[in-house]
């Protein structure tokens, strides 16, 4: 609560009051007519209008007091106390400002009470608010944050920095001609900007001005003169946290701003100044210097991120790639091409049927239950009807009877469907959760979804779920978590910001190490002699391909997930038709990346 210390006028004033009573005049010492105390009380309560009423110029005082509160910020609190007044009506106000924990400012001002036709009032002057506040000047509170604090990768390389940008706006009244003039100026910088896109943006925004684009400083310098020649266009320079390199692009960067703001605010300094009408400092009243701020470090690897971006950019259909450290769970790269970006951050939260990549879960469940071993010989017919559901292999390939390891490596649907039919209704959800799929993670800096693996109460649903169709879904992030957990030996806690703790809604028991070892061996066989043999030149790589059908016309997504050294990854090409495009993306990333 704001408090006011109202000190009554001294005895000299009280005697004057008594002398004036016969003339019917109210003196400044009368409590209801104490202008210093009333002014102090109103300021303390933040009531500018009421404070102004106790001055000789309420309009000017109200404007100045409101301006003071505005420029010192909504969080500012003031306690004002009135000091004794001498026989001439002169007195003092002590201002005690608080701007937050450890941010305080105390000072004293002087004023004079005068008798007016409306009673005793404070003679208005801006100096009532501060002795150095001249007409036209105003207060300014500044949070002095170290905006040069960068966002860096795991090795300290810059990922994001504070940069000057130009915000390009167009007055709505100039839209018809302005959009046509703007588009050819901006399109060489951002090909997505067209006359039509500007008009679309105008329909989505409100107000008299339309924000058209935000340009980096170098780009702005190239076109500033042309922009300023277009009627209705305004260029405003601002500061913004941007990727250090235009080439860097990832859905994870969208969530870094908040963490960065928190980081630079922790060591922020502050200052209160009086500035003139042009904003030039006149008097710095107090300040606390900003403390050095450590960079905000992400788990990303700049080199790997750029490699992932290059890999997905080669695909015409929506393509994403997520790489994660098996040792730490830290995200190493999250990339999407332009086609994928149109659907949002699908690398982190897009849910798709995982297809045959889910056979890693099915096989782990069978191994854990003792239903089979890698050497168990099982039939792999080209087509099988199980629980009323006809399951075909790709192009109806028929391997006859083969070990489970071979059926896994060759991605035999009929084998896996029959195997899943022998599992309990909770087997697949339980094992999926052991590897992180279906777990709800709260990862500071990003919003993620791993997938859904419902309990399969009917045998038919177990059959479909066992080959990654049915009701099973997974995100690329979720599949990368599963592979990282497999490589780690227990469920990893995925992370993005170094030092920020991820939480999970459950902590499942790890898979039996023997099961993990057997799965890793079968994944390696998939690369050396199975469906991912196109990547057989990559030493130590193990993985699982997947083709997941969707819709009624036989379209399919293509997946490839795996582990190479410390890198666990998931590659998805939406509508890719087969796993081949996803395998290509992984190869384009892994060959130059090595085991990282």
Image: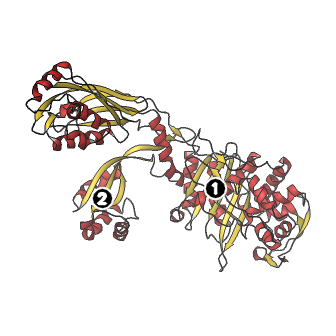
> Residue lying farthest left?
23
> Residue lying farthest front?
22
Which residue is painted at 64% across and 51% down in the image?
A: 441
| Pointer 1 residue | 477
Which residue is painted at 24% across and 42% down in the image?
A: 50
Q: Is residue 126 visible?
A: yes
The N terminus, quarter of image: top left
| Pointer 2 residue | 169
- The secondary structure type at the circle numbered 1 is helix
What percent of the width, then of the height, locates residue 438? 70, 57
- Looking at the picture, tell me which residue is in the foreground, 339 or 422: 422
What percent of the width, then of the height, locates residue 590? 65, 52
Could you give the CA–CA distance between mark 1 and mark 2, rounded to whole angstroms?
A: 37 Å
What percent of the width, then of the height, locates residue 481? 68, 52
> Residue lying farthest top?
11
Looking at the image, residue 314 sits to the left or right of residue 122; the answer is right
Disc sitting over residue 566 in the figure: none
Looking at the image, residue 467 sits to the left or right of residue 141; the answer is right
Q: Is residue 133 visible?
A: no
Q: Is residue 179 above or below residue 297?
A: below
Q: Residues within 10 Å of mark 2 (few under 14, many from 20)?
A: some
- The secondary structure type at the circle numbered 2 is strand
What percent of the width, then of the height, locates residue 241? 43, 46
Which residue is painted at 76% across and 60% down in the image?
A: 429
């Amino acid at each position: 609560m704001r408090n006011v210390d109202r000190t009554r006028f001294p005895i000299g004033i009280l005697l004057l009051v008594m002398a004036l009573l016969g003339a019917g005049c109210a003196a400044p010492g009368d409590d209801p007519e104490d202008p210093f105390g009333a002014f102090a009380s109103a300021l303390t309560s933040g009531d500018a209008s009421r404070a102004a009423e106790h001055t000789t110029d309420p309009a000017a005082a109200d404007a100045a007091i409101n301006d003071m509160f505005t420029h010192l910020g909504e969080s500012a609190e003031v306690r004002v106390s009135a000091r004794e007044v001498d026989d001439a009506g002169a007195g003092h106000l002590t201002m005690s400002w608080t701007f937050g924990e450890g941010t305080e400012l105390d000072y004293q001002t002087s004023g004079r009470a005068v008798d007016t036709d409306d009673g005793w009032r404070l003679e208005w002057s801006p100096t009532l608010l501060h002795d150095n506040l001249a007409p036209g000047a105003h207060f300014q509170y500044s949070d002095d944050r170290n905006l040069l604090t960068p966002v860096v990768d795991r090795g300290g390389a810059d990922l994001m920095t504070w940069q000057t940008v130009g915000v390009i706006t167009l007055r709505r009244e100039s839209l018809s001609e302005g959009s046509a003039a703007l588009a050819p100026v901006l399109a060489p910088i951002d090909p997505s900007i067209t006359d039509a896109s500007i008009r679309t943006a105008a329909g989505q925004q409100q107000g008299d001005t339309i924000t058209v684009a935000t340009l980096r400083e170098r780009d702005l310098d190239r076109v500033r003169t042309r922009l300023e020649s277009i009627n209705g266009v305004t260029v405003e320079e601002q500061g913004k946290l941007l990727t250090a390199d235009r080439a860097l692009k990832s859905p994870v960067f969208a969530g870094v701003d908040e963490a960065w703001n928190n980081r630079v605010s922790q060591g922020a300094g502050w200052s209160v100044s009086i500035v003139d009408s042009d904003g030039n400092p006149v008097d710095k009243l107090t300040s606390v210097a900003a403390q050095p701020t450590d960079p905000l470090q992400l788990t990303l690897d700049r080199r790997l991120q750029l490699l992932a971006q290059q890999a997905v950019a080669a695909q015409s259909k929506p393509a994403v790639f997520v790489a994660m450290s098996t040792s730490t769970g830290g995200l190493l790269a999250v990339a999407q091409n332009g086609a994928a970006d149109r659907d949002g951050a699908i690398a982190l939260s897009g849910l798709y049927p995982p297809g045959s990549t889910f056979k890693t879960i099915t096989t782990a469940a069978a191994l854990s239950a003792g239903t089979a071993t890698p050497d168990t010989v099982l039939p792999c017919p080209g087509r099988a009807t199980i629980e009323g559901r006809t399951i075909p292999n790709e192009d109806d390939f028929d391997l006859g009877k083969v070990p489970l390891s071979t059926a896994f490596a060759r991605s035999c649907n009929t084998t896996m469907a029959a195997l899943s039919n022998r599992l309990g209704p909770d087997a697949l959800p339980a094992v999926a959760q052991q590897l992180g799929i279906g777990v709800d993670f709260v990862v500071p800096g990003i919003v993620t979804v791993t997938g859904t693996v419902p309990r399969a109460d009917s045998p038919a649903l177990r059959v479909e779920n066992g080959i990654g169709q049915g009701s099973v879904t997974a995100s690329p992030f979720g599949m990368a978590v599963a592979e990282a957990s497999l490589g780690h030996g227990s469920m990893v806690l995925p992370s993005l910001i170094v030092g920020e703790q991820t939480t999970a809604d459950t902590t499942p028991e790890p898979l039996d190490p023997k099961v993990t070892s057997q799965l890793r061996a079968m994944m390696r066989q998939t690369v050396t002699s199975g469906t991912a043999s196109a990547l057989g030149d990559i030493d130590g790589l193990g993985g699982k391909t997947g083709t997941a059908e969707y819709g009624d016309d036989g379209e399919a997504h293509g997946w490839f997930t795996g582990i190479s050294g410390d890198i666990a990854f998931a590659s998805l090409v939406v509508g890719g038709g087969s796993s081949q495009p996803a395998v290509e993306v992984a190869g384009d990333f892994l060959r130059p990346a090595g085991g990282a």
